[in-house]
Image (cartoon, helix red, strand yellow):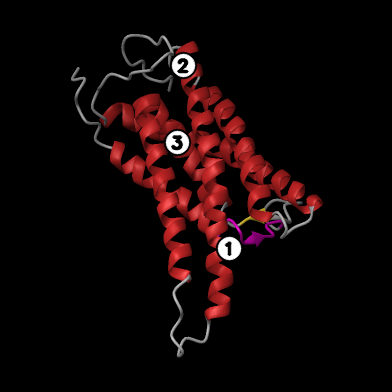
Amino acid sequence: MNKNAEPKFYTLFAMLIFVTSVCSSMLGSRLMDISYIIPGATLVSGGILPFCISFVLLDIATNQYGYIRVKKIIMLVLICKVIMALFLYSMMQIRPATSFHYESSYQIVILMMFRAFWASFWGTLVSFYLNCYIFSKLYVSFYGRMLWLRCLVATTMGEIVFSLVSTPILFWGKLDIHHIFLLIFHNYGFKLIFEFASLPVIYLLVYLLNKYEMAFQISYSGFNPPHKKINAEI
């Protein structure tokens, strides 16, 4: 086993987590009615689907690459979100061309997106780290077994924290308290359904990664883990 080996798909997972997280931020302020898909879900965030996918990818990456490596991915995602938010805001301060007739609409959309990036930043900061921490604790406690339980516990905790942190920041002053809590409730319900439904896909991807990914040692700082990587129960 080569401790210094670079996992083949680590960069791909980092890119996918970043893309889904950013898409979730960009679409987050658009509210949708998906009651024709899930009865009663009349108020959900437009970024709900890429958001759910980001947590699935985060669980798989944590399972395969360990807490330390995934913390680096989370930090890069946060840095990129800050850079994107600053670019959005700073570029909107430049005077538009006289021939551009959509400035007022553009200001509304971009500045709302700027607010969504900051709301997502704080939600991501807390929930992604919490998700990975809980997942890693359970990984060590169960010696790499019970993948389904690790995914469900870590994700349900991480996603509710994200909703409680980011939703009020994004929609405070835009929605009343009742609709903010309704949005949190509906979003969380969709996330739970998605997590349960995605378990077969998670197992398949973990199986494929265990089969085709190079072997390397996972390091857990402060977790007192086993000395070598234990493959998740498939």
Q: Is residue 74 visible?
A: yes
In this rendering, position of residue 92 left or right of residue 205 = right
Query: Which of the pair 92/47 is nearer the observer?
Result: 92
Residue behind mark 3: 58
Location of residue 56 with respect to 26 vertically, above or below: above
Q: The magenta stretch spans which residues?
A: 27-35
Which amino acid type corresponds to the residue marked 3 in the rendered image? Leu
For disc 2, the marked residue is: 145
Q: CA distance from mark 2 to mark 3?
A: 17 Å
Q: Nearer the viewer, residue 108 or 44?
A: 108
Contact between labelled residues 2 and 1, with CB atoms less than 8 Å apart: no
Which residue is denoted by mark 1 in the rendering?
A: 112
Residue at image position (58%, 49%) is 119
Residue at the spot 29% in from the left edge and 40% down from the top edge: 11
Neighbour class for label 3 at 10 Å: few (<14), some, many (≥20)? Answer: many
Circle 2 crowding by C-alpha within 10 Å: few under 14, some 14–19, many from 20: some
Mark 1, secondary structure of its residue:
helix
